[in-house]
């Protein structure tokens, strides 16, 4: 099994739980309902973090991941270390060996098993990225976590640490029609799984159809959801990439999670490609990349 498919296995949509923890007015019951619905509809993994916490309870996000795994035993769980909540609207970052080891051990305890993938949450904010990566590699060697990666990492940073150890995965923002595909391309070229967070631009973004008008028109013509068709086209166009979405309603969780089973035809393929090209973020040429 190559490193890309070894992290998560199945291709498809990953369900992120950040808003299910952090959104005002969200209740534990509703969050669990959304998670169970997303898993039942086909989400292939859960994305959580130590930082998806309330001020009083640092394990809320990881307990939601456990709810998901209880619903589907063996479901991969991605969590993140080195970033933690310190007040109502304040978080801090610490990529030291002590902090990462502590976080990884607590994650393993809360999840009841080694995380499938442990990411350094704010690679962009740590003091010594090489120390952080050496620690992640030790945690993987010791079996405290199954695989390791960086989140919010630059290509320069990945180049800097490439001699230390093999990074299994990178989780960076890939807002469709906004962000370029360079980080993704680097990861695919280097056998690193790419987790694309916030493909719809997050909770505050402009409506998705404004960024993918051709896919939106096709969705209207087919009586389908633009979010679902967009995710399906994204999975088709980007081998080695797993989109991470953050729905807060059962309906959107089911719709997004099921995108992994949507059939992509040439019409959808070219609508998506053309939408990206006209936004000046053309899809990468994929010749010669490893696929799953
Ligand atoms: N590593 C990091 O530093 C980092 C940073 C940010 C996010 N993340 C991860 O990425 C996840 C997703 O991030 P995000 O929530 O900001 O981005 P997102 O999924 O791009 O945007 C969330 C918005 O998309 C809507 N949506 C999702 N699926 C939909 C559907 N099928 N139909 C209609 N609307 C839909 C949601 O609507 P509703 O609320 O109405 O459902 C919500 O308003 C997070 O939960 C987290 O796990 C990681």
Image (tube, rainbow, N blue to C red):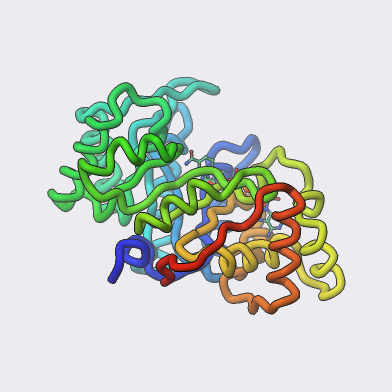
How many discs appear?
Answer: 0
Question: How far across and down, in percent of the image, does residue 24 sit?
Answer: 64, 35
Q: Is 190 on the left or on the right of 14, as rendered? A: left
Question: How far across and down, in percent of the image, does residue 226 sit?
Answer: 75, 62
Viewer can see residue 216: yes
Question: How far across and down, in percent of the image, does residue 242 sit?
Answer: 49, 59
Residue shown at the point (49%, 59%) measured from the top left? 241
Question: How far across and down, in percent of the image, does residue 50 sit?
Answer: 38, 38
Residue shown at the point (68%, 70%) measured from the top left? 269
- Image quadrant where one finds the N terminus: bottom left
Q: Is 189 on the left or on the right of 105, as rendered? A: right
Viewer can see residue 113: no
Is the residue 113 above or below the residue 48 in the image?
Answer: below
Residue shown at the point (61%, 62%) measured from the top left? 234
Residue nearest the viewer, comparing 242 with 203: 242
Task: Determine which quarter of the picture holds residue 192.
Answer: bottom left
Residue nearest the viewer, comparing 154 with 127: 154
Residue shown at the point (53%, 53%) measured from the top left? 244
- Image quadrant where one finds the C terminus: bottom left
Is the residue 217 above or below the residue 59 in the image?
Answer: below
Residue nearest the viewer, comparing 209 with 237: 237
Residue nearest the viewer, comparing 100 with 138: 138
Residue farthest left in this picture: 142
């Amino acid at each position: 099994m190559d490193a890309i498919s070894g992290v998560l296995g199945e291709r498809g949509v990953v369900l992120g739980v950040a808003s299910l923890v952090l959104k005002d007015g969200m209740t534990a019951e509703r969050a669990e309902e959304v998670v169970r619905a997303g898993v039942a509809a086909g989400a292939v993994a859960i994305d959580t973090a130590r930082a998806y916490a309330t001020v009083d309870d640092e394990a809320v996000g990881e307990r939601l991941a456990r709810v998901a795994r209880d619903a589907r035993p063996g479901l991969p769980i991605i969590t993140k270390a080195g970033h933690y909540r310190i007040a109502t609207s304040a978080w801090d970052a610490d990529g030291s060996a002590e902090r990462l080891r502590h976080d990884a051990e607590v994650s393993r305890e809360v999840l009841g098993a080694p995380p499938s993938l442990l990411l350094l949450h704010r690679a962009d904010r740590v003091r010594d990225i090489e120390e952080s990566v050496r620690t992640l590699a030790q945690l993987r060697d010791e079996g405290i976590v199954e695989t390791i990666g960086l989140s919010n990492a630059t290509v320069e940073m990945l180049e800097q640490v490439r001699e230390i150890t093999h990074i299994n995965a990178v989780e960076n923002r890939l807002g469709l029609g906004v962000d370029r595909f360079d980080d993704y391309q680097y990861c695919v070229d280097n056998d690193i799984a790419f987790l694309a967070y916030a493909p719809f631009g997050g909770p505050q973004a402009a409506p998705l159809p404004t960024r993918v008008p051709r896919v939106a028109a096709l969705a209207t013509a087919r009586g389908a959801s633009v979010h679902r068709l967009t995710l399906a086209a994204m999975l088709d166009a980007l081998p080695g990439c797993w989109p991470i979405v953050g729905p807060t309603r059962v309906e959107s969780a089911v719709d997004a999670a099921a995108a992994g089973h949507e059939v992509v035809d040439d019409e959808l393929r070219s609508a998506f490609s053309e939408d990206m090209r006209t936004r000046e973020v053309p899809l990468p040429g994929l010749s010669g990349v490893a696929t799953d």
